[in-house]
Each structure stands twice: as C-alpha cells, then as structure tokens.
Amino acid sequence: MKNKVLNYLKEKNEFISGQAISKALKVSRTAVWKYIKQLQKDGYAVEAISRRGYKLSGSPDKIFPDLVRKGLKTKIFGREIVYFESVDSTMNEAARLAIQGAKEGVVVCAETQIHGRGRLGRSWVSAQGKGIYFSVILRPRVILAEASCLTLVFAVAVCQAIRLVTGLDTKIKWPNDILIGQKKVVGILTELNAELDRIHFIILGVGINVTGQISSLLANATSLEKEAGQKVSRVFLLQEILRQMEKYYQLFHAQGFAPVAGAWRSLSATLNTQVKVVELNKATEGLAMDIDNQGALLIKEKNGAIIRKVSGDVVHCRVKK
Amino acid sequence: MKNKVLNYLKEKNEFISGQAISKALKVSRTAVWKYIKQLQKDGYAVEAISRRGYKLSGSPDKIFPDLVRKGLKTKIFGREIVYFESVDSTMNEAARLAIQGAKEGVVVCAETQIHGRGRLGRSWVSAQGKGIYFSVILRPRVILAEASCLTLVFAVAVCQAIRLVTGLDTKIKWPNDILIGQKKVVGILTELNAELDRIHFIILGVGINVTGQISSLLANATSLEKEAGQKVSRVFLLQEILRQMEKYYQLFHAQGFAPVAGAWRSLSATLNTQVKVVELNKATEGLAMDIDNQGALLIKEKNGAIIRKVSGDVVHCRVKK
C-alpha cells in the first residue's frame, strides 16, 4: 500500500489532497498520513501544505529493490532483492539466507556495511550511500575444481557493465579487481560453503566506489563519478551489472570457461605487464603471460620458468612494450 | 589440582584418608572433598568409607582429552583437544574455533551430539557414549582443485587405524564410508571454508559406531564391538586414528595423492564391483574401474563409456568376478 501511495503521487505529479488519495486508494485518511510519513522516512521528499495536500518533489538516492527490479529483465539475478539501510556485512546476511535455502540469484544490498569484508580477511570501506555494496547467492552446477574460475567470470561481467553504463575504460587486474588507470574502483569477493565433493553455495560480493572523495587511506582507489566527471545512477548501474552477471554466468555454464576467458583477456590490465605476485610472504616476479583454463595466472620468470599462481596479490610493475 | 587428586588415588590404589591426601597435596580437606565430588561427577568411581577414606575403584568410559593425549605422540593432530559431554555438533564447534584462529590439528570431540551432521545435509545419530564423534581443523597447503582428494586421504587413515586396533576387515566404500561386510561403521564429512582462490580451513568430521545396538532405523549400519565380539577402547582407537591421520596427511603433502591413492585402492570395497551412483535425481550404473588423481570415481557403463563421478551416493550391486 505504501508503494501504491507512492505511485499515485508520482502519477499525479501535483498537489493532491489526503482525502482524494484516501478515496482513490480506498484507505483511511489516517492510513494515508502514515504512509506519507513512511515515504518521507525512506527519503522521499513529499511536500505537505494544508488545504492543498501532498506532492512528491524528489526521490531518494537509494538502491531500493522496487527501483532496481523495474525493467531489470533478468531471470535469476536480482529477482529477489533484500535491502538494508545498514548491515553488518552483505556477505554474512546472504550466507545466512543461503543456509536457510534461499535461491540462486537472491541479492542482498545495503547503503552501508558496518564490517564490510574484502578478500583474504581484509576490511572493505562502505561509505553510506556512496557505493554499491551487494552480495549474490550462487548455486553453480560445477565441481570444486571447476569453480575456481567463477571469480574471473564475474570480474568480466562487472567490468563490462561499468563500461556500458559510464563509458569509462575499466580494466581487470588479476584475478578480479577492477581498475581505472591504476586505481581501484571495484573489489570482488567469492566465499564458498561446500563439502569437498559438493558445493552448497557461493556468495559473490561486490563493492563499488561510485561517488565522493575516497578516503586518503585508499591512495590507490578512485570512484566512478570522480573519473567520469558526472553523476552515475547507482540503480541503473546495479541493474546492468545484474544483467551482465546473468549473461556471463549462463555462458560459463553452457560453454565452459573458454569464451569468458577470451573476454577476460581483452579486458585485462595484467597480461603482458611485468608483475609481482605476493602470496603469504613469497613473491613471484615476471611477465604475466596468460591465464589457464582454471583462471590461474601464468608468469614467465627472468630465467624462463613458467610459474602458475592461483592466489595472491598482484603489483603491476611497468608496462612491457 | 583435580588431576593431581586423581593421579594420587591411582598411584595409591587403596583406601587413603582425606587427611593424608590433604597433607600430601598441600590442599585443605574441604578442597579434597570438592575434587572427589567433581571426579565422581566426571564418572570416576571413588569409594568413600568413613574412617578409611577414599579409593578409586573405576575410571569412566569417557574420551577425556588427558587420556587421549597420553602416549599419543603426534605433532599436529590432537595436540589440543576440546571435549564436550554433549554438543550441538562438533563440526559447528570446530568451525567456530577455526574462525577464531585455532591451529591445524585441533580436535573437538563429544560423547554425544544433539544435531550431528552427515554428508549432504543428512543427520548423524550420535548415541551418548556409544561412538567416537569428533572433528579436526585442517589448514591444508593446497589449492581448491587439489583438496578434493583429501576426503579419500582420511578414509584411508581411519580404515587403517580400525584395522590396527581391532583386526577387523574394514573396507572403504567410495568416497569415504567405512564398511564391515556391507554394513557401515564410519561416516566421514569434510566441510570447507574458503574463498575461490584460497582455502581458509577444512573441518573433517568423523563419526564411528563403537558399541551397542544400532537403531533399527539404520539397517545398513553395525558397530565395531558387535563385529569384533569384544570391547573396543574408544581412547586407544581415537589415538590410533589421530596417528594414522597425521601419517597420511603428511604423506599427501609430501608426495601428493598418488601413494595414498594406492592405499585407498587396496582398501576399496567399491572397485571392481557393479555400482549405481546416485546424484540428485540422476543415477549412473556400471563397473567401478578406478579412481583418478582427484579422487573421482571412474565408472564403465554397459555401452563402454567411461563416466567420471565426483560426488554422489554409491550402491554396491554385486561383486563382478
């Protein structure tokens, strides 16, 4: 009913009395007043002038599920969206739902996270309303050994979606950071709940810096609006990301990793550069040659040896001509 | 101090006055009395006769950490043991400890579990004091694709340990059930906490039917004592299992899956039999030919096609001569 009141106000787009709303929607005037209060609390600017009534003069900059689902046209990703103004971590919330049996494609998003997580136990800064922070439940029909490349599949999807919506020249740093120039705008995290012979579910988490100044703590980060020099709609961007995710995920299930790997290569900021890959306390240096069919990075060391890295942090040293 | 009182009673092996204990251990007589009460509560039979004092006349049939650690001689497995009379699930408890940073090899064991888990979300009946129910924290230094065979590594370890302690002709049903004849005595479960490019930890869970009648609900189950026709010490068995686990786990890390796979083959009840492997609603029937280097089962169908199964439930049809 709150949405009905909202839609009625949108439709009229002028001052309309509480009585008229009450009559049109067949609810009491007290109820109308309550729903208007709720909408204002949600961030909608509803003007109220005595004898003239109510008028919607502004929508909140929020990634409300209704807004995201409108015109989304996916079959799996984002058909159900669980929204929080603030949450401990969308990863934890999505995992909790998945354990309770939530379906593949369910999205948990939040305006801010109190304990946002990054890869390898790091934290992820989630400034209120300044980014897109969401997790998706996946139930891939593959075995453990085949799942490792999924992290690259979704890097391609997010990278492509940002390109489509903003026109920015985003690139992927192996395995799944998304950069503009050498600065990070997106982090992707993939956590697994599985037995050794069966995946129960995967939670894919995405954090995107959309707007505002990036904390000085994050010297190597930037935001989409800073780079684009204009406003980026978080709702439209999230919609496109969900569409691209569904597209590449279905491609992966239908044809395996090879076609996605091709897309990854063409978007890669890492291949053909000198890299240092740090894992635990060990560093491997050399030329990033290619990825293999499990998504591992193949590095050619100075002495000609090819090293295969499955995990680690990449430092891009300099572009190799 | 409770253990000091216990050891003193064990040492003396006759009636000894509270006053003598108090003097020998330098604690008050009230304290001695309290410790005796605690020992009785733990299940120790301590006789108390006025003017004669106390005598230890029986130890409880419990898998107390102190008893298990005595003479264990492992370096990793069971160096730390967390014991519960009753617990929700040793899997959950071990996972909780692992998230808090508990080391590899930490064991969580319980006399009974309220919600013991089996593979694929099934439950595991954990009758009070009638089995060994424990979980071990593992932090293997391998990637996801290499971890899938760990479940077979531990099946070999448990199977060998039971053979050494009881002399029973235990066999392994792929992937990791342990059978005597066609009846199950051990279930093994391996749950994973990981990102797609890094294993945080694995919780290995083992449930063993040691003693007593098996519920009629479990027609295909038996217990070690029923099969052996004699008493089996749960403490000695758990010790040997921890030793064998450490041995095969180290072998796997040092030399890979090949040598362990050899041991698995020689203990297999599945190879060279006609099998039906049921996964979700799909069944594959044929001759179980071999396992591959990821621990997957290779099945030759009637039409000669070789099917590779990574997960599923095996039904042994009949022995193929």
Image (tube, coloured by chain):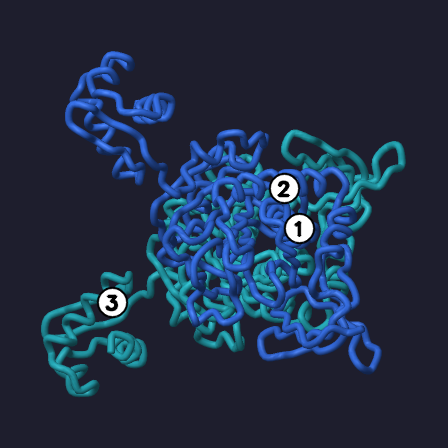
Chain colours: A cyan, B blue
Residue at 21%, 76% (x, y): give it. Answer: A15
Q: Is residue B40 left or right of residue B213?
A: left
Residue identifier under label 2: B244
Residue identifier under label 1: B156
Badge 3 and badge 2 both on one subunit: no
The image quadrant of residue B35 is top left
Q: Which structural element holds mark 3? A: helix
Mark with earlier residue (1, 2): 1
Badge 1 and badge 3 both on one subunit: no
Q: Are marks 1 and 2 in contact (CB under 8 Å)?
A: yes
The image quadrant of residue B175 is bottom right
- Residue kind at label 2, given as amino acid type: Gln
The disc placed on residue B257 is: none
Residue identifier under label 3: A39
Q: Which is more toward the observer, B272 or A141?
A: B272
- Residue kind at label 1, given as amino acid type: Val
Task: Report whether residue A289 is seen.
Answer: yes
Q: Is residue A269 left or right of residue B245?
A: right
Q: Residues within 10 Å of mark 3 (few under 14, many from 20)?
A: many
Pinpoint residue A101: horizontal percent, then vertical percent: 43, 68
Chain hosting mark 2: B
* Quadrant containing the C terminus of chain B in the rendered view: bottom right
Number of numbered discs visible in the structure rendering? 3
